[in-house]
Image (tube, coloured by chain):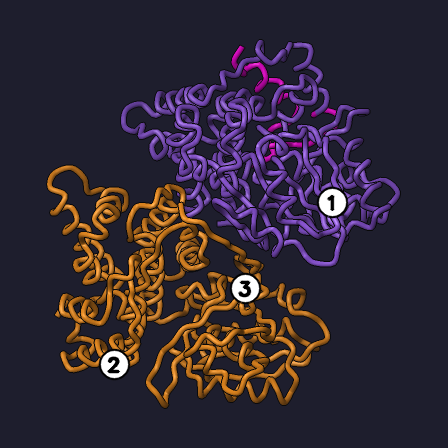
Chain colours: A orange, B purple
Amino acid sequence: MLNFEYCNPVNIVFGKGQIAKLSKLVPEGVKILVTYGGGSIKKNGVYDQVMQALEGRDVLEFGGIEPNPRYETCMKAVEIVKREKVGFLLAVGGGSVLDGTKFIASAALFEGEEPWDILTIGAEVKDAVPIGAIMTLPATGSEMNGHAVISRNSTGEKLAFWSQKVFPRFAILDPTTTMSLPERQVANGIVDTFVHVCEQYMTYPADTPIQDREAEGALLTLIEEGPKVFIDPTNYNVRANLMWAATVGLNGWMGQGCPQDWATHAIGHEITAFTGTDHGRTLALVMPALWKHEREAKRAKLLQYAQRVWGIQGGDPEKNIDLAIEKTVEFFKSVKIDASKRAYGLTDEICDKIVNVFNTRGVRLGERGAISGKEVGEILKLCAE
Amino acid sequence: MLNFEYCNPVNIVFGKGQIAKLSKLVPEGVKILVTYGGGSIKKNGVYDQVMQALEGRDVLEFGGIEPNPRYETCMKAVEIVKREKVGFLLAVGGGSVLDGTKFIASAALFEGEEPWDILTIGAEVKDAVPIGAIMTLPATGSEMNGHAVISRNSTGEKLAFWSQKVFPRFAILDPTTTMSLPERQVANGIVDTFVHVCEQYMTYPADTPIQDREAEGALLTLIEEGPKVFIDPTNYNVRANLMWAATVGLNGWMGQGCPQDWATHAIGHEITAFTGTDHGRTLALVMPALWKHEREAKRAKLLQYAQRVWGIQGGDPEKNIDLAIEKTVEFFKSVKIDASKRAYGLTDEICDKIVNVFNTRGVRLGERGAISGKEVGEILKLCAE
């Protein structure tokens, strides 16, 4: 097991009817800015529940945070936070709303000239406006971590930052709020969660049996519960388990002490930046190709995954690995994501551009830093046509 | 899944050489009281590492916190904390030292007349002196929770309390510090951890597949790693996995949203109070008897446990349950705990006294509150002779 430090102070408030607790969770005596996205919360009743719970408080609103939240949009909210002296940000929606809100919280108190530096050169987030979250889309795990991913229209960049300062003070997770989600977003969330877990797991063995089994347990749950949600979308327990899987999948817990490989996300972000493809779908496209490319480096864990997650063992190990990768793709299809380069407009020309991005940045991805621009190109070639 | 709230702000600092980080973790400008037990930390080098890391700080010491820490001992430390205006408590040792320190932290700032009320009538802990922990004995999980168990000499009571205020600010877990532990304590810690996990797991199915698999993963790890530590006591990875299991086993995470049954601990505490038997050993004695007694109520989970933890499936379900309970007892023996009433001096007379305690208190134990004094008596009868 590798050395680690882990501190996750988020107060998770999980279950039916928990939004009513908001009035106790949001601090008294401060101006609150409620942030949200395209307005689905006004259709599904969540907005009304929030406003009811905050009755009598000094509440402002900022809607319109888009999927892949944009710097340009967030900076408009930063102006409001500064002008109105907002003391608490309440993000209501999915991971994009919360990620955007984390950036707003950091940028509003940023001491430097240009808050974009937080994303490009890792400028330190010394302080941030406190955040609370009501999650209505299980996917990113943003409700229980300090991560955020922000895109910038003017440069076409999609970049991530992390800070202990932007962990939400609380996150309310009511599975019933997810029942009206479009199938497309549900599918994206399931695959996003599955891949988050795999990126903390599918590396090389580091003698971490507890963490491995936590990861395998989350994967098995997604495989069992994922397809059910499309057949029985108002099944509370299915929704609850998928929502909990998303939180467990990226609160960092299962990956402590483990080598990790976030190459799938890094490559996926670029596909989204160049083609506009949904985040979850890019992951379903890239991860199987990454595993094929990194087959030797990941051999022992691929075999463990084949055995413990898919029950594939005995016989030829090579075939077992092939079958486990096939099963993974089949699972993505079972939750209605049939990923291909053609479907997502990922042309050879765009692939070349993506390779260039990695060459220019000079980063080395993967658990051993073995993936540079050249390997990204090879992985993109291995993606389903 | 049941509704829940979970907030665990402990900063876990895990791994080799992490005690050196102490100087950054302990706040500046306050008087520090280092608490410890019988002095083993002076023999294994931990005391020296701590004092080196705290060089130049205003440090006091309070040693002699015993296993099953006593109210009478803790109150002596409370006097020091008050008199010397101590601003930070650093517990160095096992769960008993940390539990005692949690009570010291609470009692020192207690506003009522009698801090024992925290344990007997649940008097609120409104504030507590901040605590840091260096754990040298993996067992209680106290390093990442707000629980403490305190005994009182004058009354023979052993009682528990919980407060969000006594979660340690940080817990340093260096597996190398556990390598010099006596076998007896190692064995106790493994069984204690195993039983903590079971008490969050062995109830009735509540559609909590992620939590179930987290629990099963911890149990499998204890079964695999536990016996190794006696053969190869300086194996770092074995020590690391056992240490992490103890934290995972009782930081509350795997039990969120699940029904729970803490009857084994409740009964075990009384056996310790009356016979002085080590805590872990009382659990090894009681849990198999409890499972036999509650066989019908726990049937579905016993069968799941048989299958997923012991690979027992097919054939007669009754035999599978019997075998799973047998395997559990064999596992305890494999880590050198061969529990019996005779070995622990648990006579019929003492059993009657314990039943009386539960009758007098009138509590109802178990996931459905089905266990009162009468059932405790029946469970004690089913314990290995």
Give the residue at mark 3. Answer: A171
Element on which disc 1 rests: strand
Q: Is residue B19 above or below residue A109?
A: above
- Amino acid type of the residue that numbered disc 1 sits on in the rendered structure: Leu
Please give the chain letter of the residue carrying mark 2: A
- Amino acid type of the residue that numbered disc 2 sits on in the rendered structure: Thr
Out of B46 and B376, give the one closest to the viewer.
B46
Whether residue A289 appears in magenta in the rendering, the answer is: no
Q: Give left or right: position of A359 versus A46.
A: left
Element on which disc 2 rests: helix
Q: Give left or right: position of B195 versus B158.
A: left
Give the residue at mark 2. Answer: A275
Query: How crowded is the residue under tag 1: few (<14 C-alpha within 10 Å), some, or many (20+)?
Result: many
Splitting the image into 4 quarters, where does residue B328 fall?
top left
Q: Give left or right: position of A263 versus B280.
A: left
Q: Is residue B324 above or below residue A158?
A: above
Percent coordinates x, y for residue A314 in the rendering: 15, 37
Q: CA distance from mark 1 to mark 2?
A: 59 Å
- Amino acid type of the residue that numbered disc 3 sits on in the rendered structure: Ala
Splitting the image into 4 quarters, where does residue B345 fall?
top right
Give the residue at mark 1. Answer: B33
